[in-house]
Image (cartoon, rainbow, N blue to C red):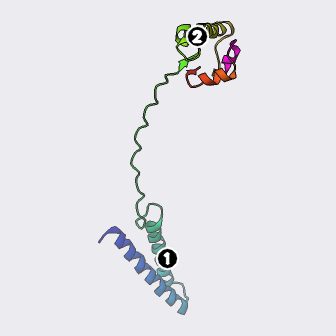
Amino acid sequence: MGVRAVVHLSAGLALAALAFAFGRWLRDPEPGGSLIVLLLGSGVVALAARRLYGAGGLGRAPAPVAPPAPPAPPPPPDDRLDLNAASAAELERLPGIGPVGAGRIVEEREANGPYRSVGDLVRVAGFGPGRVRGLGGRVRV
């Protein structure tokens, strides 16, 4: 017989004793034996119910344990070209940028400080919003 069965049995017996004692107390309501049995029985029932059905009690199924999550895959390498670190030769390898455009990008960076976003390329002569959008996935800051 397991612990759970013993607790159920004791709770049932205590409930029966509680009903018996309450019946006797209703017929003869004098303080004494019946009242003490009534109070003890109610305490046992309350304790058993709390043990059985409380959080983590024996009457509840154990919470399923989720397997640990697999480690996250490493982020893919960022192969975009950094506008603030690239040389003119590296910038020339981008589609649509020749030696003149690459030189202007480097000159603008050296003259007015680093780019804070890819959109800052519009500061460079010859680079409008459409041309900058075309480079968006190939460059970063």
- Graded by Cα atoms within 10 Å as few (under 14), some (14 to 19) or many (20 or more), the crowding at tag 1 reads some
Magenta residues?
119-127
Residue 102 horizontal/vertical position (percent): 60, 10
Three-letter amino acid code at disc 1? Ser
Please indicate whether residue 4 sits to the left or right of residue 133 in the image. left
Three-letter amino acid code at disc 2? Gly
Please indicate whether residue 133 sits to the left or right of residue 7 in the image. right
Q: Is residue 117 visible?
A: no
Q: Nearer the viewer, residue 81 or 114?
A: 81
Rendered residue at 70%/15% (across/down):
123
Q: Which residue is mark 1?
A: 42
Q: Nearer the viewer, residue 39 or 44?
A: 44
Q: Nearer the viewer, residue 116 or 133?
A: 133
Q: Secondary structure at mark 1?
A: helix
Q: Is residue 127 visible?
A: yes
**Residue 119 sits in quarter:** top right
Q: Which residue is mark 2?
A: 98
Residue 124 horizontal/vertical position (percent): 68, 13
